[in-house]
Image: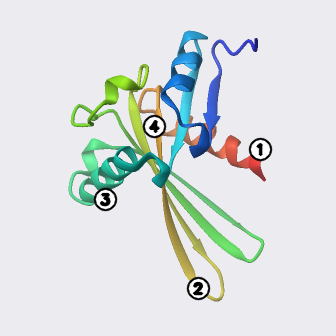
Amino acid sequence: MLEVKGAIITIDAMGCQKEIALKIREKEADYVLSLKGNHGNLHKNIKTFFESKINNDEQLFNIYEENNKGHGRIEKRQYFITDAIEWLPKKENWKDLKSIVMVKSTRETKKDVTEENRFYITSLSPKPELAAHAIRSHWAIEN
């Protein structure tokens, strides 16, 4: 019932479902869907791909970086996006899947440095600034 044509729909891991991706594309919108362990092989395959390629085949990725300082911490986010997904099993089950994304977040405080990698699938072309904006906008809603 919602008019979403031309929008980018972001959904956390619970909503990362093939049927939802299909409905979004049928409504002529794009999706950025978060992946976590509840997607077993898909999450594992994408995580393994990024971890094995990020330092060795950087030319595979379009990269965008953001740095923020505030609240007693420094945050660095690197967005890696690629459309090199021909190797991905069952990718055809995800309507118009075009790219995969990894966000590497580094948070530095006076006490320690933490690092986290998050993974996404998307119908967007591999434009890291666009993916970054969509992902950051989603985080803003959650906060």
> What separation in Å lies between label 4 and label 2 (alpha carbons)?
30 Å
Amino acid type shown at disc 1: Ile
* Image: 32 above or below 120: above
Residue for badge 4: 121
Q: Point out residue 86 in the picture as x, y percentages from the top left corner.
A: 23, 31
Marker count (numbered): 4
> What separation in Å lies between label 3 and label 2 (alpha carbons)?
23 Å
Disc 4 crowd, CA 10 A, few/some/many (<14, 14-19, 20+): many
Residue for badge 3: 51
Residue for badge 2: 112
* Image: 77 above or below 135: below
> What separation in Å lies between label 1 and label 3 (alpha carbons)?
29 Å
* Residue under the image location 54 percent in, 75 percent down: 114
Residue for badge 1: 141
Judging from the image, what secondary structure is the residue with disc 1 in?
helix
**Quick check: marks 4 and 3 in contact, CB under 8 Å?**
no
| Dot 4 or dot 2, earlier in sequence | 2
